[in-house]
Structure formats: structure tokens, C-alpha cells
Amino acid sequence: MKPKTTLVLLVVFAVLLASVLLFESRSKARKETEEKTKKLVDLASADVEKITLKNEGGIITFKKDDKGEWLIVEPLEAKADASEVSRLAEDFSSLKFERVIEAEGGDPAKYEIPKKELTLWYKGQAQPVKLLIGMENPLDSTLFAKREDEKRIVLLAGFLKTNLEKKTFDFRQKDIFKFEPEDIGSIKLKAKEISWQAQKKEAEWFLDSPVKALAKKSRVEEVLRALSNLRAKEFVAEQKQDAEIAQFGLEEPEYAVVLSLPARNQEIMFSLHKQDDTVYATTSVSTKIVTAEGQVLTDIEKKVEDLREKQVVVFNSWEASKVGLRKGELALSVAKDKDNKWLFEGPAKEEADGSRVETFIRKIESLEAVEFIDSPADLQTYGLAQPQAEVTVWTKDGETEKEFKVLVGTEDPEKKQVFLKNPKLEYLFRVEAAFLDEFPKEAKDWKPEAPEQKKEDRK
């Protein structure tokens, strides 16, 4: 191809490319303009400072406080459900319409405008935006509407109807008793025939009454979450009086839970009472009485036996970094190196069979009580004054290292069970003895099989 021809083709290509780009740019700008003209409101929802909704249920007014949190100020003063009010602000701040019904001169009354009204005050705007909403279009469930400061009547998407028809209760904050479960230092629960107390020490929960024992952390946290997440189904008293407390059975409630918050030097008492299939609730720091779902009673009604931690030692086997055991004349210690290989501790640093070591650690992790021996009078009776064996597992999670020890006592051959002790606890465990079969009889049991032995085993 001649240079002159090539140059001409390049020029033609450049002109075509420029035309395409110009067309796309204009098309995009035209589309953006069209989108903007199809908006009844085009403002930032974050700038909304006040909203008034008028519907068949009455007038509801919302206002942001100094912290930017939504409050209901009319028909009563209460905390608002931030997500509900924010959704209202978002839906009507960037408000598209489906189509224009009448550009000007239309009679709003013909479309039952205004059946509902929504007024939004924006930061930096001298005048609020007032939307007048009419009847539902019987053809497609869209809504007839107009701005108070415009003549045109338009159709809005039907899904907006849901928010416009909500009542005051729908916009109220329902979890009014909420607290952070991790802030709780102790709990006292009394429910019908159940009564117990527990206290948090570092990251663990311990029962103080009716027995001193390690509690299952997840079970205690279930109780705390149930109370923290308790949601009002109905507000039956805004400023509770003695007469109302007595009326709903909360003077002597069936369920009473006292929580301590050490950081605030505060106690909160939850009172819950079931009356004619309705659960009433209040707290010592709230002026309100509410009704709640009955499930909350099931969630907090934990018996002591359900709360007790059955595991002898509570750790995650995958975090194990070292394990040591003593049984009779045998004493072994293996640890993980930086490549996650298990090595015998000692000058030689021989490699251990990782599969067998980890199987043994998982057996220790899964040890659970079939029975507790509380306040044992004599360790000798259970073979624990001089244990038959001792296992220690060390774990590492980041920079945190922990040690877990199990002492093995007498085996009951008839029941096939054995007594164990966790030195950190005052009581003993009776567990199934099957795990004893995983103990190595000598060091070579934890050494990798030689290649020729593996071949022999496969034959």
C-alpha cells in the first residue's frame, strides 16, 4: 500500500472515530438530561433535616438531633428507627416519576390530591419540598402526585405507597432496651423454678450459683443477645406508673434478669411477665412497658445443666502449637515449626507424624463430661492425687499463647469411663475412656512410618 493511501485511510479513521465519540458523548448528555427532567425531586437525602408525613393515621414529624440521629417529635417524642426514616428520605429525595399525566391546568382533586402529604426540609434550602400524593392508579398501582410548587401532575412508582402508609409505631425504634453484650460483667437470672448467677472473668463466663463451674460462653451470650435484641411489638406505657407495673404483672415478674455493666458502674434489671399469651417487658432504666415476642422467654430460660461447659478443656485444635504428655515412663513433647511441621522437642528435632499428633489433639479437644463430680472430697479416690497420665496442649493465636492441661485418673472398666481433672477448675469430670486408646505407648508410635513399612501395610 502506498504511503499516501495509508495516510488518507488514517485520516478517514480518525474522523470516523471522532464522530462516534462525539455522538456517544452527546447521547450520554442527552440521556442524563432526560433522566434529570424525569425527576420530581433531585436533592441529597443526607441533607434532609426534618420530615413531616401526613396520612390517614395522622401527622408524624421527624427531626435530626445534634448528633444527626433521627427522632420522632410528633405525635410524641421518641427515638426513631433510623433505617426506616432514612429510607423515607432516600426514596423521596431522588424521586423519579413514571410519566406526566397533565403538564398544567389539571384539577388535583380529580386524582384525590392531596390524599397524603410529605414535606422535606433540606440543609441550605430556604423552603421545604412538599409532595402531594393522591389516589392509586387502578390500571397499574402507580400513584398520582404533584409538587406543591409545580402545576404538572405525574405518576409515581407504586412501591412508594408502603412507606407513605406507615403509622407512628412503624417508624419507632423497637429495640429500646439494647445494650452491648460484651459490656456485661455479671448476670443474675430468676425465672420460675430456675435461678442462677454468672460472672465474666477475662473472656470466660463462670457460674457462681447454684454451683461454681465454667459456663458455656455461647449459652450465656444467647441469653444476653435475646435481651439486647428484644423488640417491642407494642408500647403499652410511655411513662410507666405503679398501677401499670402491677397491671401487667411486672411488680413480681415471672422472669427477672439483673445485668451489671462495670464500665458504667451500673445495673440494669429486666422484668418480663407472661399474661394471657402476651409477654410484657420493661427495665429499671426505661420509662416504657412494651409487649414482646414469646420467643424471648424460651431464649433466656436456660437451666444450669444447659449452661455448664461440658468440655474438659476449651480450645481450638487448629490453633495448637505444642503438645506434651506423660504416662508412666513415657514422656513426649512435640511442637510445630514455622513450616507447620510437627517435630519432637530435643537436640535432634526429629519429625513427628503430624496426622497422629493432630488426631490425638482433637481427641483431647472433644473430651466431654458424662457426669460432673462437684467439690470432690478426696482426689485419691479418683486416682488424681497421683495422676495416671497428664496431657498439656499449648495454643497460639497471633501473639497470644495459652496452656491447657488434663490430668487422667482412675479408669472404671465396667462403665468404660475415666476421671479427669482440669487443674484450673475445682471439680472433676467423668468421661468416656475410649480416648485412652489414642495415647502412644512409646515414642515411635508418633514417628512417621518408614517407606518399607508403608508398602508392607498396603499389601
Image: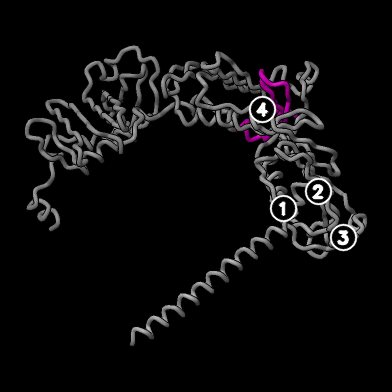
Is 297 colored magenta in this rendering? yes
Q: As rendered, which of 441 and 163 lies closer to the eye?
A: 163
- Mark before the other along the chain sequence, 2 or 4: 4
Considering only order in the chain, which callout, 4 or 3, is on the residue closer to the N terminus? 4
Q: Is residue 180 left or right of residue 236?
A: left
Work out whether mark 3 precedes mark 1 in sequence or the reverse, and give the earlier one: 1
Residue 23 showing in the rendered view: yes
| Discs 1, 2 touching: Cβ within 8 Å | yes
- Tag 2: residue type? Leu
From the image, which quarter does the C terminus lie in? bottom left
Using the image, determine if residue 293 lies above or below residue 181.
below
Residue at image mark 1 = 95
Query: Residue 370's quadrant in the figure?
Result: top left
Q: Which residue in the protein does label 2 denote?
A: 131
Q: What stretch is highlighted in magenta?
A: 273-298
Instruction: Judge by depth and name the residue closer to the eye, 123 or 18.
Output: 18
* Residue 350 colored in magenta in the image: no
Residue 360 percent coordinates (x, y): 25, 37
Give SS at disc 3: loop
* Mark 3 neighbour class, 10 Å CA radius: few under 14, some 14 to 19, many 20 or more: few
Mark linked to residue 104: 3
In the image, what residue type sits under mark 4?
Asp
Give the alpha-carbon distance from disc 2 to disc 4, as whole Å: 26 Å
Q: Decide if residue 328 is on the left or right side of residue 409.
A: left
- Residue placed most toward the observer, 4 or 250: 4
Pointer 4: what residue? 66
| Mark nearer the viewer, 3 or 4 | 3
| Amino acid on which the number 1 mark rests in the picture | Leu
The relative height of residue 377 versus residue 145 in the rendered view (above or below) is above
